Amino acid sequence: MTAVANHEPPLPFSPAGRQALHDLAVHAATGVTVVCGFPAAGKTTATRLLAELVDPVVLDKDAFAPRLEESVMAELTGNPHDRDSDLYRRVVSPHLFLRGSHMAKGRI
């Protein structure tokens, strides 16, 4: 993966945020970058903008298992969008991240 020079991500990021993404892109081109954070923190937006700066392999848990995750949680807790319960963390989350790591091994 190589960084693309002189490419500025568009708003919604501040100039400092754009600079931070540019700086991250220099390092992301030669390693692994994990983007994580609270819901609605801007993870997807930051990842998309970073992807414009480098040629990444992006593994997004929400892209490969959302319907299964929602179905399981609806059956277990009655709330298909539950990601905060101990039950989710014990039963569902470990399997999603294990699958993500297996996908990464096949792509990186």
Image (tube, rainbow, N blue to C red):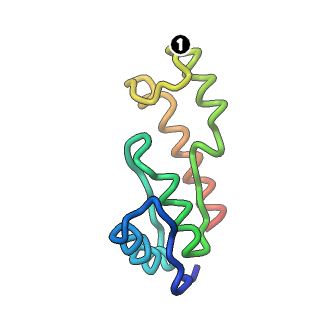
Q: Is residue 34 above or below residue 87?
A: below
Residue 8 % position (x, y):
50, 76
Q: Is residue 99 above or below residue 27?
A: above
Q: Residues within 10 Å of mark 1 (few under 14, many from 20)?
A: few
Q: Residue at x 51, y 60 (%)?
A: 47
Q: Furthest residue to the left? A: 16
Q: Is 59 placed left or right of 26 in the picture?
A: right
Q: Residue at x 53, y 80 (%)?
A: 7
Q: Nearer the viewer, residue 42 or 37?
A: 42
**For residue 23, which quarter of the picture?**
bottom left
Amino acid type of disc 1? Gly
Residue 19 % position (x, y):
38, 75
In the picture of the structure, the residue carrying the numbered disc 1 is: 78
Residue 89 % position (x, y):
42, 31
Q: Furthest residue to the bottom? A: 5
Q: Circle 1 — which element?
A: loop
